Image (cartoon, rainbow, N blue to C red):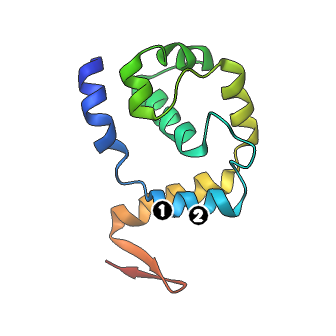
Amino acid sequence: MDKNTLKSSFGKWVSPINTKKLFEQVEENKQDYYTKKLTTAGYIKLMLLAQLQGFESLEEMSDALIDDGLQKALGFESISTSQLSRKNNEMNPMILSHLFLDLVYKIKGIQFKNGKYMPL
């Protein structure tokens, strides 16, 4: 996938993520309480990009952020390898688990309402 295709399609690729629910969980868990640069939403986008592009290291991820268009698509400027490493260590796995399950239920046509899972 070339850079132009990535920039034009990345927003569509991450659009199924329920950002409202994600932000609620981030607030509830105080995940971004001391965060200045690399928010949880930005981190998730960067991890999805890393998967899509096949990055094999934090250094590759950091180097990819030199591209201004990519920075704009992800919503932040350059991020150092050490910042990525810290975020990896600080990330609450329950947030990622809920995000994953929400996407699985969306794929299966199920939504969560009033404490119960219901078909869409």
SS of the residue under disc 1: helix
Q: Position of residue 102 (x, y in %)?
A: 47, 63
Q: Is residue 113 left or right of residue 14?
A: right
Q: Residues within 10 Å of mark 1 (few under 14, many from 20)?
A: few
- Going by the numbered disc 2, the residue's amino acid type is Glu
Image quarter of residue 7: top left
For disc 1, the marked residue is: 20
Query: Splitting the image into 4 quarters, where does residue 3 fall?
Result: top left
Farthest residue toward the front?
36
Q: Is residue 1 visible?
A: no
In this picture, is 74 found above or below 77? below
- In this picture, residue 72 sits left or right of residue 25: left
In what element is the residue under mark 2? helix
Q: Are marks 1 and 2 in contact (CB under 8 Å)?
A: yes
Q: Is residue 50 left or right of residue 30?
A: left
Q: What's the residue at 24%, 25% (across, down)? A: 5
Q: Is residue 61 above or below residue 23?
A: above
Q: Residue 27 location in percent, x, y? A: 65, 60
> Between 77 and 98, which is closer to the camera in this rendering?
77
The tag on residue 24 is 2
Q: Residue at x 51, y 30 (%)?
A: 76
Where is the N terminus found, in terms of image quarters?
A: top left
x, y percent for residue 117: 46, 80
- What whole-number distance in Å separates the C-alpha atoms at marks 1 and 2? 6 Å
At label 1, the amino acid type is: Lys
**Relative to 68, is 94 above or below?**
below
Along the line of sight, which residue is nearer the eye, 4 or 50? Answer: 4
Residue 13 can be seen, yes or no: yes
Q: Which mark is residue 79?
A: none
